[in-house]
Each structure stands twice: as structure tokens, then as C-alpha cells.
Amino acid sequence: MSELNATVSTSNKDHAERAEVFNKDEARVNWHDQTLWFIRSKRDKAAHTLAEWELLREAASQIKLNVLDNLFLYLQEFERNAMTNGIKIHWAADANEHNEIVHGIIKGAGVSHIVKSKSMLTEECHLNEYLHTRGIDVVDTDLGERIVQLAGEAPSHIVLPCIHWKKEEIGELFSKHMGTPKGNSDPQFLTGAARANLRQHFMSSRLAITGVNFAVAETGEIVVCTNEGNADLGVQLADVHIACMGIEKIIPKRKHLGIFLRLLTRSATGQPITTYSSHFRKARSGQEMHIVLVDNGRSERLGSDDFRNALKCIRCGACMNTCPVYRRSGGHSYHYAIAGPIGSILAPGLDMKKYADLPFASTLCGSCTNVCPVKIDIHDQLYKWRQVIVQDGYVAGGKKTGIGIMDFVFSKPGVYRFAGKVGRWMMNHFPFVVNNKMNPWYKQREMPVAPKQSFHDWYKERQRK
Amino acid sequence: MKVALFIPCYVDQFYPTVAIASLELLEKFGVEVYYPEQQTCCGQPMANSGFEHLAGSCNNLFIENFSGYDYVVCPSGSCALHIKDHLHSKTNEPEAKAIRSQVMELTEFLTDILNVDDIQASFHHKVGIHQSCHGQRGLKLSQMTELVAPQFSKPERLLKMVKGIELIQLERKDECCGFGGTFCVAEEAVSVKMGKDRVDDHIHAGAEYITAADMSCLMHLEGILRRRKSNTKVIHIAEILNGATA
């Protein structure tokens, strides 16, 4: 039944090229933009109901900074307490180790059909693909994830995986995969159909994978936030529970959880809290519980002053909803498991060459930084990644030549004024030199009207008078 | 008080009237304004493209031009922010540091240093204010919709002193226009779409003019408006405050 979750894309197109394709259907871009702007507006309303909003953000940021400063201590504390609770702890250095560990547990349990609730970490590690090629059938139980899974796509948004799908298209997809009546796109009906279909998978699955939103060092428990209760249902019906988490998901104490739970869904969707904030502390009698803690580049990130605090991220997606570029280019244009501004500062840390384009997919407007509930300096990191990517040689040679010319012109006032004068004269006398298809500015915009006199020339003239 | 006027390169070349309005406006308020004649560019186009490390000679030229003043005033939030955040020098860091603390955007200077509370200008038009991101979120010229914090806006406060002006209300009062420096050509499709959406918001609200404290955003929006042969025009805030009669 379930199809292979496609890798994000196999094509080599960069963000700008993919975004250009996305923009061929302007009505759809408008719809995508407005849908996500609606969520940003809900977030604003929810934030404005709390006078202490900015204090909450600051507190959350400070707690996360403390976690990053003392991560090894908190991880040890978490492991100790979780083991005392009877949980089996596994450590994975990278995505591959993570996948091997999870596969090992599944093989050990002797099952070939499993359910999985939302976990961006397993997307980052391409777990579904890994398991699929080893004969394990994974069913994503989050409705949005199920939709993109049926479509053979990756999620386009970390909180709203199928935000790029219209209900009519989902109706068609369900008709093909679940036999719902053709042409029925009533959301309530389709959700009911998905629910009935998923129920069979829940009932027949003896092993459930979940993600982790927060791992409390003090108690060794994990907290999983869902709106659909799918994590709970999967875990409660299964003999084996595997929870997969990045090592940065730690918070020191249970009392800190309140701060994050108040921020998480207000930032994500404008809800005061997730429908289910489920605490998993120990396996029920007869059940096995495993937690896989994954590094996959995080330790390296921790050692970088400029980029470490991206590890504060709690995966709320607010930066995507507010990003004017994300809203008009779609999640898949980022060709990484995590799209949008936060993805653009996380991805280059994993593979700078492959994701060299992403830090440039931004106007550096700074809205992402302002909505971030844990105050990650996202747009400043985008700027810093650009410097690193260029210095490490991951931009085209032509660009470097162009910038070299620019620096030459701008560092010599005489050359600058001469070039300006010639340029303006050319624009006035031979407009086709700039008004042509080779000039990306001119494609959909007029060039500025070049005046005869620059300000500098005017100023000199005024001085002479 | 010695004030140096820092005119962005594209304003010098394409929008001299904006520079003239900035100069005249400051002079009207009795400021002794100097225009260092060997100035070129702040280096932002290179730095935002990831080539900050190649902008050394450009930075040194900036320092040569702008040392020794009380303030460096610029009619562009973006260029002012770039200097404030990123002007460094291997050979003259103390002077770079001094300039970083002296640079101010024009409306910020009029508000915070000159304490302007009366402007002799009239502009009988419906005007939409575009909050340029670097001025707004970088220099904090206006409060930002993302934050739960008290409202204020330096450009708006100044515009409200202009007789006859009618400021229109936007659906999205501080969304980016999509100019973004080299982004405007590197990500042409998204850049233009963002610009079109901004323009539509202003036009739906009845704007005859779109104004901003940054000409770069306006150059981009103007390009879209002119391609559409729209009647709505762009005008830099300095021109309105200086008493432009449109």
C-alpha cells in the first residue's frame, strides 16, 4: 500500500530554478502565499494574547543556550534516568547509524510492517527509504505526511507537510489509493476515509516509531506533540516503541516544558497548545521502549560560534510561514528535508556543496528572526553562510569575476564616476544594451530612467555657482 | 555639528533628486552638511553576495571619505545598516569602529538627533509607506508586526507632519518587497512576484504614491509599476519631506 517516500528530488536544479518553475502558475503561488500568510496571521493573534510573549521567547532562548553549553552533562543525565526507567538508549553518530539501529530493532522484533508518527529527524536521515529497500513497510500516520507519502513526495513544510496540496488534489489521490468516490473533496469526508484506512495499519502494526519534541534530562522522559493523537495510538497498540531524536532536543527540567509548550504551537499554527502533548516515561508492562539519540553533524555545529545556536530550533515552522520567499517558492524548492529559512542555515552544515544555493534564497528581510520562538539569528546566519560558502569555493567562477570588477570600480572614485557616466549615456542612447532578454531585471521590470547628471555632477555645479 | 552626507551609488547615478532633497532638507534644519566627493559605494552588493572578504579596498575608501565627522547620514536604511554592521578595516579599525557608531539613516537622524517636530511641506496625495526591511528590522526605524511590543514609526511620524498627506492602510504593512540586492536578479521570479504583491497591496488601498526610506526597494517597485504602465508612482521620503510638488 504505502509507496516509497521519494527523496526530495533527484534533479540538480537550484532554489532559483525550482522557484521559477513554481512561479509559472501564478494563481497557485497566490493561493500558497495566502494560505501560509493566514497561518502567520493566526500566529500573530496568538502571540498578542500574551503580554509576556517576548519574555517567553527570551526565557526559551536562554534555556536552550544553557542546554547547548552543557549538552554532554544533560545527555548523560537523560540517559541515566531513561535507563533507570527501563528504556533502551542507542547513540547514532550519523544518519546511516541511526537507520541501522532502527532497522536492527525492527528485525529483532520480527516485523515487516510498522507505523510512524511525525519525525523530521527520520526525514533528515531518509529512514523510510532505507527501510523500504530492506523490505520494511512504513506507514506515516500523521495525515499530512500520509498524503505526501501516498503521492511519493517529501513533506514541503515541517509542520504542514502537504500545505502545497489542494483539497481537490487530495480527493483524487485518495480516490486512487483508498477508493474514495471520485470528485469528493470534502475535507471532513476525506479525513474520515484516511482515519479508517490508517486504523487498519494501527491495528496490525506491532512496532511504532515516533519523533521527540522535548527530552527532559531530569526525568528521562520524552514529550511528543501531535494534533491527531496518532503518536499515542501507534505506541499504545504496539509491542515496541522507538523514539528518534536529535541530541539537541534536551531540556533540563520538567518545569521548563511549560515555556516551550506555550511557544511551540502559538508560533506554529496559532493554537494555544497542541491537542496532545504526550509524555512517555517508561514502557508499559510487556512493551519495549527504545530511544535513538542522533548526532548527524550536530556536535560539529556545536563547535561553531557563528552557527551553533541554530541548534536551539524547536521545529515550529514559524520562519517558513512568515518567509516571503518560502511562501512564493514552495517547500520543495529548498531540496532539503527542512525547507525555508531554518532549513537554509541547517542544510549547508550537512553538505555545503549540495546546499550552497540555499543561504542565497533570501532577501535577508529578518522576519524569520523576529518570529523565531527561541530567538535564532536566522538572517544573520544566512549572511554568514554566504561568506563561508564563497570562501570555501562553492560559487560559480563567473560570479567571482563580476564581484572583482565591482570592487575595482567601487574602490576607485574616478573609475566609478566614469563607468556611471558611460553607463547612463549608453542607457539613454542605446537602451537595447540593457533592455534585453539577457538582463534578468528587464524580464518583468523596467530599468530606471538614467538622468543626464549624477548627484556628484550636480553638487560640483552648485559649488561653482 | 559636522554631518557627512553619504549617498548610495545607485542614488548618485539614477536618483540624484533624492540626494538633492536629502541635502536641502538637512540644510533647512540648519545642519552643516559636507558631501565627501570621492565616495562610491558601501560595499553591500559584494558582501551580501558572500564576498565581504573582497570588499577591503572599498571599505578603506569609505573610511577615507567619512572620517572626522560627528555623523554620517544616509537616505537609505539598507546602506546605513551595512556600514553599521559590517564596516571593518585591516589597516584602520579604530576609524571603522567610529564610523559604525556615527552612521544614521536620514529619518532616524531627523527624529533622534534633530528632534524634528515641525516640517514645512505639503503633499496632497494618498501615500502608502513601504517599510524597507533593513531600515525597519535592522535599524528599528519602525516597530515590527512580528513582535509583541509598543508601536512607533519614525518615517510615519515625520510624514504625518506634512500637510495634506493621506496615509493609506495596507493589508501587510511590513512585508519585504523582494529587492534584496543581487537577489533581485539571482532569484528573479520570486523577487518580481514579491514586488508585484507589494504593489498590488498599495494599489488596492488607493495609493497614488509609494514612499520609503530606501530607494532600492522603490527602484524595484517602480520597475514593476512602469512595466504595468500604472498611474501609481514611487517617491523617496526625503522628497516629500523637502516639499516636493508632484
Image (cartoon, coloured by chain):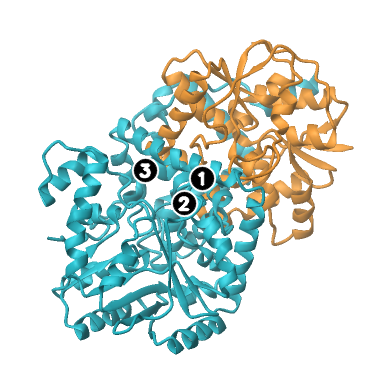
Chain colours: A cyan, B orange
Which disc is residue A268 wearing? 2
Kindly identify the residue that appears in the image at 63 percent across and 57 percent down.
A56
Image location (x, y in percent) of residue B190: 40, 38
Is A131 displayed left or right of A366 in the figure? left
Q: Secondary structure at mark 3?
A: loop
Is A219 displayed left or right of A106 in the figure? right
According to the picture, the residue beneath numbered tag 3 turns out to be A329
| Vertical arrangement, residue A325 with respect to residue A396, above or below | above
Mark 2 Cα shell of 10 Å, populated few (<14), some (14-19), many (≥20): many
Q: CA distance from mark 1 to mark 3?
A: 21 Å
Which amino acid type is marked by label 2?
Answer: Ala
Kindly identify the residue that appears in the image at 38 percent across and 55 percent down.
A227
| Vertical arrangement, residue A301 with respect to residue A73, above or below | above
In the rendered structure, the residue with mark 1 lies on which chain? A
Q: CA distance from mark 1 to mark 2?
A: 7 Å
Is A100 displayed left or right of A36 in the figure? left
Q: Nearer the viewer, residue B67 or A155?
A: A155
In the rendered structure, the residue with mark 3 lies on which chain? A
Going from N to C along the chain, the mark reached first, 1 or 2, is: 1
Q: Nearer the viewer, residue A274 or A169?
A: A274
Which amino acid type is marked by label 3?
Answer: Ser
Q: Secondary structure at mark 2?
A: helix
Q: Are marks 1 and 2 on the same chain?
A: yes
Image location (x, y in percent) of residue B102: 79, 46
Which amino acid type is marked by label 1?
Answer: Arg
Kindly identify the residue that appears in the image at 50 percent across and 27 percent down.
B221
Q: Are marks 1 and 3 on the same chain?
A: yes
According to the picture, the residue beneath numbered tag 1 turns out to be A43
Please name which of the two marks, 1 or 3, marks the residue nearer to the observer: 1
